[in-house]
Image: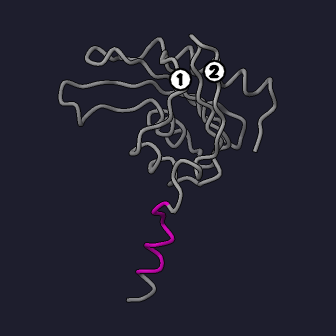
């Protein structure tokens, strides 16, 4: 799966802009995410840390929540921007959260300081994922 260069650039720019708004007083690790809906609309999210670490919200999930709140549930691509030297993949919770909406999501992970970009499909990072299909099968057996 690929994305037009101009659209990828727009997605990355949106993720970079929202990364600056991240609330990361504990880790100092700011993350920005920009999610492209099938409608063409872009939804953004940034990480919001909490002193009760388990209550922290990742940028990727924040973007999905924005999209769902706007009525969108089908996505094409997600850009993730961090200041780390290597492009940073979504955490395990975010991978599962993203999988809820499909496995063919294009992940575009970007490290602006080194200008490195990594493009992979979500299914490459979460093979054999748990999905609603397992629940449907269990319900049919009852």
- Is residue 136 magenta-colored? yes
Q: Along the horizontal axis of the image, is 106 left or right of 134?
A: right
Figure check: 129 above or below 26: below
The residue wearing badge 2 is 116
Residues in magenta, as a range:
129-138
Q: Where is residue 45 in the image (x, y as percent from the top left)?
A: 48, 27
Question: Are there few (<14), some (14-19), or many (20+) residues within 10 Å of tag 2?
Answer: few
Q: Where is residue 125 in the image (x, y as percent from the top left)?
A: 53, 47
Q: How far apart are marks 2 and 1 (CA)?
A: 7 Å
Mark 2: which secondary structure?
strand
Figure check: 69 above or below 58: below
Q: Along the horizontal axis of the image, is 14 left or right of 18?
A: right
Q: Residue at x 48, y 63 (%)?
A: 131
Q: Along the horizontal axis of the image, is 27 left or right of 21?
A: left
Q: Residue at x 25, y 17 (%)?
A: 26
Colour approach in the figure: one colour
Mark 1: which secondary structure?
loop
Examine the image and state in which quarter residue 109 appears. Answer: top right
Q: Which residue is drawn at 55% across and 26% down?
A: 87
- Residue at the far bottom: name it: 142
Q: Mark 2 and mark 1 in contact? Answer it, CB < 8 Å.
A: yes
Q: Magenta region, mostly helix, strand or loop?
A: helix
Q: Where is residue 50 in the image (x, y as percent from the top left)?
A: 24, 25
Q: Position of residue 8 (x, y in %)?
A: 73, 27
Q: Residue at x 56, y 44 (%)?
A: 71
The residue wearing badge 1 is 86
Between disc 2 and disc 1, whose residue precedes?
Answer: 1
Q: Which of 111 and 141 is in front in this view?
A: 111
């Amino acid at each position: 799966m690929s994305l037009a260069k101009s659209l990828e650039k727009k997605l990355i720019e949106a993720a970079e802009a929202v990364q600056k708004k991240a609330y990361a007083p504990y880790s100092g690790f700011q993350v920005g995410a920009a999610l492209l809906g099938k409608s063409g609309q872009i939804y953004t999210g940034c990480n919001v840390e909490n002193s009760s670490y388990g209550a922290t919200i990742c940028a990727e999930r924040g973007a999905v929540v924005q999209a769902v709140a706007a009525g969108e549930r089908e996505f094409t691509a997600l850009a993730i921007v961090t200041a780390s030297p290597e492009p940073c993949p979504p955490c395990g919770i975010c991978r599962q959260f993203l999988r809820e909406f499909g496995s063919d999501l294009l992940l575009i992970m970007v490290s602006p300081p080194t200008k490195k970009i990594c493009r992979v499909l979500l299914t490459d990072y979460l093979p054999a994922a748990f999905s609603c299909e397992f629940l449907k099968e269990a319900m049919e057996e009852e």
